[in-house]
Amino acid sequence: MLLVFDFRFRTRKAQIKGKPSCCFDCIPCADGTIANSTADCTQCPQDFWSSEGKDICIPKTVEFLTYHEPLGIAITVVSLLGASLSLATMVVFIQYRETPVVKASNAELSCFLLFSLFLCFLCPLTFIGRPMVWTCMLRHTAFGVTFALCISCVLGKTIVVVTAFKATFPGNIVAGKFGPAQQRIIVCSCTLIQILICILWLKLNPPFPDMVFRYSNKKIVLECNTGSEAAFYAVLGYIGFLAIICLVLAFLARKLPDNFNEAKFITFSMLIFCEVWITFIPAYVSSPGKFTVAVETFAILSSAFGLLICIFTPKCYIILIKPEKNTKKHVMAKN
């Protein structure tokens, strides 16, 4: 009698075709259902799954990117490393701000760019941990604004390089009008446009934490729903628009005659930046679960490292390793 009772709670009754109603087979309940007292199968709630014996509903495993797993630890370490390198480079530039190399690379815009890179490296930390309302809203908007600030600074530096060369032509008055005030206006206005896009995003349809069931029957993936996909791609598109303008201007100015031509470094950095984000979009769409977050953080970190290494490594090399080249004569020498 005990065996019959135990068996009944794991199976359901199935009428045998052509046999009397008292004749039936015992068929195991399907996954996600359990047998009840009437010998039928009952569907478990959406956030539960049937046990191996199909006798009780057990909670599904909740999955999100944490600080304790290897992937979360790796992202945290790389993020903090990039932020530390940005601060260290900023300290070098402030300490050597009166030297020709730092002056030639526009110390003010360089410090703004390093500060924005510092913020970009910290952005991936908001992608780790249990998604909440404020973290979902912060991670995408902070990423959008910091990268817009970063590319705006690069754009300002690129225009400085081009106009500085144009100033060597007789009768050119446009180059002389592009001073520090105009540089700040470009950086602030380009960043302000991104801020307005993010404000509209948060007002109309902001990101929110979401429970996703489609990846696995036994797992619930917690992730941040972007809310408005149009706003998300508008943020990415605006950053891409600024990056393409920088790339075109820097590419056109890459062969300017000065020995210390920053345009070629900006060209390399923008090529890396554009390649990373062009690769990111299909990878982001096709990645399942928490790997979507990993792909986005990889794109943020790799593009930030590309900017930091390509633009600032040559300068730091001269400042710290080859100080004999940190002279006005070398900086202004022709190739």
Image (cartoon, grey):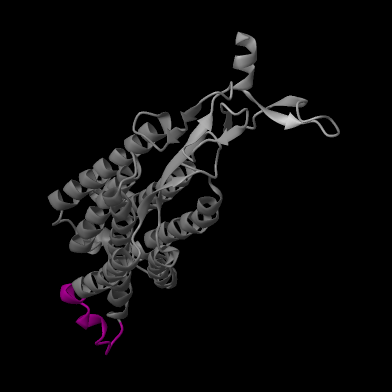
Q: Quadrant of residue 50?
A: top right
Residue in the picture at 64% in, 32% down:
30
Give the x, y percent position of residue 202: 30, 63
Q: Position of residue 277 (x, y in %)?
A: 47, 57
Confirm whether the magenta stretch covers residue 293: no
- Residue 261 appears anywhere in the view: no
Residue 106 visible to the viewer: yes
Residue drawn 33% across the image and 66% down it: 201
Which is more toward the observer, 12 or 274?
12
- Magenta stretch? 169-182
Q: Is residue 317 left or right of residue 280?
A: left
Height in image: 322 above or below 154? above
Identity of the residue drawn at 22% across and 70% down:
188
* Residue 222 coordinates in the image, percent (x, y): 41, 42
Residue 236 figure quarter: bottom left
Of the 4 image quadrants, the one containing the N terminus is: top right
Relative vertical location of residue 102 with respect to residue 248 in this rendering, above or below? above
* Quadrant location, the C terminus: bottom left
Residue toward you, 194 or 260: 194
Query: Relative to the observer, which residue lies in front, 47 or 80?
Result: 47
Residue at image location 78% in from the left, 25% down from the top:
23
